[in-house]
Image (cartoon, rainbow, N blue to C red):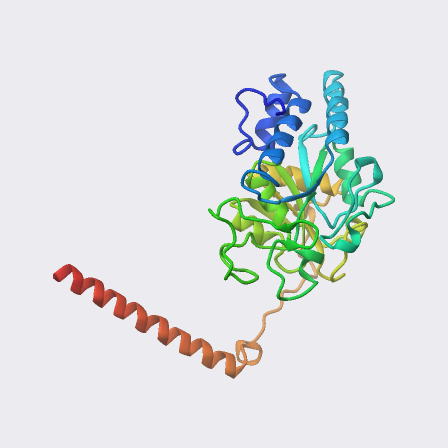
Amino acid sequence: MLYRPPNFDVLTETAGSIAKSLQSGDKTSEEVVRAYLDQIEKHNKKGFELRAIISVSEDAALSQAVRLDQERKDGKLRGPIHGIPIILKDCIQTSAELGMPTTAGAAVFKNAIAREDAEVVRRLRDQGLIVLGKASLTEFCGAKAKETTAGWNAVNGQTQSAWIHGGKRKDDMYYGRSTPGGSSSGSAVGVAAGFAPLSVATETGGSCCLPANRSGLYSVKLSHEPQLLNGVLPLCLAFDGLGAMARSATDVENLVKAMAGSRKIDVRDLEWKDIRIGFVEPAEFGVVPADENKRDGSHHQIVSFARESILRSSLNILR
């Protein structure tokens, strides 16, 4: 059993609240890292068996925490989330220094160690983030097969939602309500279950926002930046993007800033000059007739069902 600091609840702490405790001297990054490692040990493959984490970088994380604690004592702060633990979706490369493979959830990559950190990992570490572990995901970010259940992969099995008692139902399909959503399943469940206060995800078509929503988290997909995607498993070069998850909007903001590094763009400094906004004509770019007929049928069916339900309820009251 690892040491857990007093008055520290991994299920409710935010990166912001932890940062305040670190700055006041109430806690150290080493203590915080140990608390999250303790929670992972309890409920990742034991306890509730959430399977949100594929691999953990315990030695490297503790070593980095000690170094960052010393930097804080010396008056050196790298940023607002200096010394805060984070988990990364396991399709983002991490070097041998961190001691974890980059699997994408595939058995063929189970022992694959990258030569260097992905660009986003380098930026996060430069900002003082502590990489705690690699989060589970739908295998190959959901690209292996359309029948693959959200959160399942050959390396780690099925990630379970931290909010669903009993886990995924056997009859639920890919995006069934009892699944954690995907493909960044472990990134979301890991934060919700108190394995880390922050996580990095990826998204091509909903892979960050959907699981974050199902775990009750704040999230955002970053604008497409090819350089930032160096070292990240590609799916679609035009739509791939990194994502950030946390328990508060402020935490998401600070994480996005850390991921952006020195690249600063403030849209308030831009102008609308020479920019045109296009609108489509609904009659020309609307849904196809066959789909429209289905929608009309669904509408009538829903209204009819609602009327019957209201009528039955009214009759029961009168009785």
Give the residue drawn at x 76%, y 44%: 120
Q: Quadrant of residue 146?
A: bottom right
Instruction: Say whether residue 178 is left or right of residue 15.
Output: left
Q: Is residue 262 visible?
A: no
> In the figure, 8 relative to 74: above or below?
below
Q: Is residue 114 visible?
A: yes
> In the figure, 102 relative to 84: above or below?
below
69 and 34: which one is in front? 34
Q: Position of residue 309 (x, y in %)?
A: 27, 66
139 and 223: which one is in front? 139
* Quadrant of the frame with the C terminus: bottom left
Give the residue drawn at x 69%, y 56%: 139
89 and 121: which one is in front? 89
Give the residue drawn at x 61%, y 41%: 45
Instruction: Say whether residue 33 is left or right of residue 296.
Output: right
Q: Position of residue 299 (x, y in %)?
A: 39, 73
Q: Quadrant of residue 249?
A: top right
> In the figure, 244 relative to 318: above or below?
above
Q: Residue furthest left?
A: 319
Give the residue drawn at x 61%, y 53%: 151
Q: Position of residue 310 (x, y in %)?
A: 24, 65
* Quadrant of the frame with the N terminus: top right
Q: Residue furthest front?
A: 46
